[in-house]
Amino acid sequence: MKINKQTLLNQAKEDFKYLLEPNSNGNDYWHTVRVMRNAALLAELEQADVFLCELAALLYISMDRQLNESQEAKRLQVENWLQQSGLDLSDAVAIGDMVYALLQQFENPMITLEGRIVQDAVRLDAIGAVGLARVFANAGWRGDLIYDPKQQSERLTRQKESGGRSSAIEQVYDELLQHKSMIHTKTGQVIAEQRDQFIKLYLRELDQEWELGNESYLDETLLPTPISRVHIAFDDSASGSLRVALRGLDGEKVVCLNDNLMVGPLSDIHEQGGFAKRLQWWEESMNGRDREEAAEYLLMAAIVWCQWPARLDDLPIVIWASDSAAEQIGLRRLLAVLSKEADVSLVNPSTLLNRGNSEQVYQHTGEISSEKLAPLLVHAERLLPEAREVYISDWYRLIAEEGVLRLFEDGKLRSVSEDYFDESILLAARKLKAFNGKYIKSARLVGEVIGYSEQRISDSFIEYRVRRLIEARKLSYTGDLKAMRYYSVCLVEEVSRSNSAKTPKKNWMESIMPELEEAAETLQDMMAEAKASAETWKQLSVKLTEIASQAVRDSGEQHGSMLLQERMLELQAQNARNKELWQILSGMILTAKHAPDIHKAFHQADINNWPSRVEFGIIEKDDDTQ
């Protein structure tokens, strides 16, 4: 009689239901269901017997649950059930052998593909979000803590003596993070990689939350190895690259003090109301959604700044600060709040990498890859007390200046007016041809300014200045100003009161004057290029003549000489066209230069000074002009 496999699986669940009842230790009925589903999926994708994998997974977990039974008793129980199931003898033997092998030596790779799939299915349910949930459930059931760093050494000793664990986090490190390397199938490895990354992400987040407000964090970290040195970066991008660069080096901790101090009011970190003043300026200056993000960003930065400097007295510190205003100001602020006894070293990545490098110039640490950052650690130089005092004095100078915008130029910081970038914004708008009613996206204008600036300035500040220019009626806009991506801008035409009463003709002439001047400069560049090209052709012609003459003398070959003569005629014709082009360009340039004279003569009806035609660079007057 042919057995319905799904019916048999349901029967097995019913027969072993008493072993699969829900409990609070994470090994409940739904654990069994998940493992069976994992086994079925892996079997299908790995081209194994799906039914054998599902049933073997169910029987293995059911038997493994019986902690007080001997291996022999479990084996007999499986054999009896298989004999009564009606399965083919070959299937029954295969499943029985597989389950018995899994019970005896689960940690060793199984011989059959189906056996390895069941191993993978069990291990996959022990990692990822579900794996973490099971660990914490099991820890609560056993009476273990989540994590207790103060009793860690005692619990480690008890673990070695009794086989117990000190905490759930211990189990995560000892077991869950080891499972990925034990997965056999390719499908299982792909799933395991994702789940393993989630566990590591969770541990990092848990470590950050354990850190919050914890003055003893350096001694209580959840990291697998003690912290022996702290690296400081001043933005998220730089700290991320540093973490990758230092990966694999035990004891290296990267901390991000990520407040952009280039912009906004400055105050002593301990000054009462200092943070509130800085936050208020940002909230008043930023736009809609940017305002909310800025407030969140500043608050998180303030939390980090309040906690970390006080923790750094007893560990070596490496500060990574390139030649950007934000990083250099962050360096000065940090040195001002560290204790004088702190062991501080400094690495300036942009200076080190830009030295002798003309192909790429780095402005800030965040744009440097981890591969290029890693070798720079050996260049960390310890800061002597005298150098630290110079930085600290500079910090208090910046506070006293009470500015809201600072630049780093020629190795020095200076405060500037907040409208410093306004001219750059207007020039960028003209470059992008945002005039005469043509509107461009605000985000594009902001990007243009940032892209060509020698300072690393935030897009939110430039967008703030764009809105100030709109308020000053130097830019007009369409759309909604709640965020830069929702509106477009255009230059406002500057028309004085006296000009507004004049004829439309004159206004039109005035509007094209900048374009004519720009065209003149372009044409001058073209003429210079044409002259250089003509000289090249001339030299080539002489050389070809010499070659042709030598060829005739050496071989008497007339055909080659004729070809060279034809080429010479072509070059001469090209030279003639170039000369004609120079004359035309010269005339256009003079026309552009004399545009004010044309304009004046036209509006004053000065017939005697009326230029009538341009001919090869010479402006002449008509003899018969009336």
Image (cartoon, grey):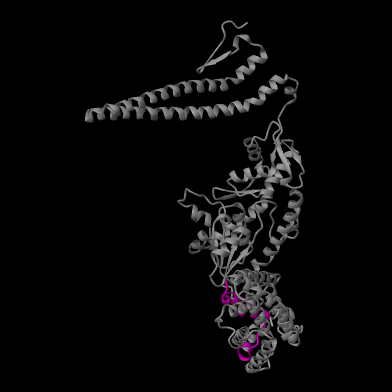
Q: Which residues are magenta?
A: 158-185
The quarter of the displayed image where residue 602 is located = top right
Where 469 sits versus 395, above or below?
Answer: above
Where 147 sits versus 284, above or below?
Answer: below
Between residues 14 and 177, which one lies in front from this camera angle?
14
Between residues 485 and 62, which one lies in front from this camera angle?
62
Residue that appears at 35% across and 25% down: 566
Residue 26 in view, yes or no: no
183 falls in the magenta region: yes
Q: On the rendered image, what quadrant is the N terminus found in?
A: bottom right
Residue that appears at 39% across and 25% down: 570
Where 340 sits versus 580, above or below?
Answer: below
Between residues 357 and 192, which one lies in front from this camera angle?
192
Left or right: where 125 falls relative to 273: left
Left or right: where 386 falls relative to 539: right
Residue 265 lies, in percent from the top left, at 70, 52
Between residues 165 and 191, which one lies in front from this camera angle?
191
Residue 556 lies, in percent from the top left, at 23, 28
Dominant secondary structure of the magenta stretch? helix
Residue 55 in view, yes or no: yes
Residue 91 lies, in percent from the top left, at 62, 83
492 falls in the magenta region: no
- What is the residue that sits farthest to the front in this orientation? 1
Residue 562 lies, in percent from the top left, at 31, 25
Q: How many marks?
A: 0
Q: On the rendered image, what quadrant is the C terminus found in?
A: top right
